[in-house]
Amino acid sequence: MPISRAIGVQSVINLPPPASRSQPPPGFLDHVWKKLTIGAIVGGILLEVTTRSLSPWVTSGVGYAYDAVACGGRAAMMEGDRLSEAASQDVTRAQTLFREANSHYAKAYACGFPDAGIRLAANYCLGLGAPKDNARALQVILEIEDRHEAKRGRAGDVRRACKL
């Protein structure tokens, strides 16, 4: 008599007979494959997060979430662009729409978006949404040129166009 039968291991473990062990139960391989796939996906995400090599879509999503909580500059910039586009199409309400756009651009610029400052300076220079104010436009342009080296070219374009 085998030892396992003598001590009752077969009945405790409840092993199937040897003939049925050659084939896995129906659906077992699909179940294992799904578990491995989910594990690989989760493991890959955890690896990316822990090594800080996040995909661009993740970092942009985090940027949008941070912006919405912290300052709202990105949303203000987009709203200013939308209002400026609407003002260019609706001549009767253009000054009102540009005034609203300028307030959104000012908020976005205060949040650290230099492109919003460039648009704001151009609007000041052209008198869109506010009385023409070259001194104010020049002040914004000089701030952008001092703080944002990458935007010096675009700020210089506005300076030349407005003859500041």
Image (tube, grey):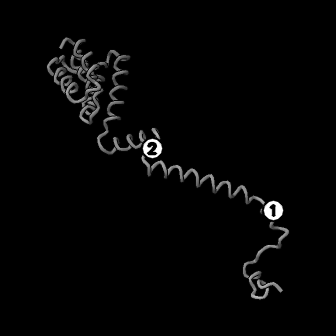
Tell me which corner region of the image, top left, top right, bottom left or bottom right, holds residue 113.
Answer: top left
Report the side of 65 relative to 37 (left or right): left
Q: Earlier in the sequence, mark 2 or mark 1?
A: 1
Q: Which mark is residue 54?
A: 2
100, 142: nearer the viewer = 142
Secondary structure under the numbered disc 2 in the rendered image: loop
Check the image and report above or below for 10 versus 44: below
Task: Give the residue type that dot 1 points to.
Answer: Gln
Q: Name the residue at 28% across, 24% down.
A: 151
Q: Name the residue at 73% across, 60% down.
A: 28
Secondary structure under the numbered disc 1 in the rendered image: loop
Find residue 88 and report its horizontal and vertical position in percent. 35, 17
Task: Give the residue type that dot 2 points to.
Answer: Leu
Report the side of 92 relative to 3 (left or right): left
Q: Which mark is residue 23?
A: 1
Q: Is residue 66 visible?
A: yes
| Quadrant of the rendering where the C terminus is positioned | top left
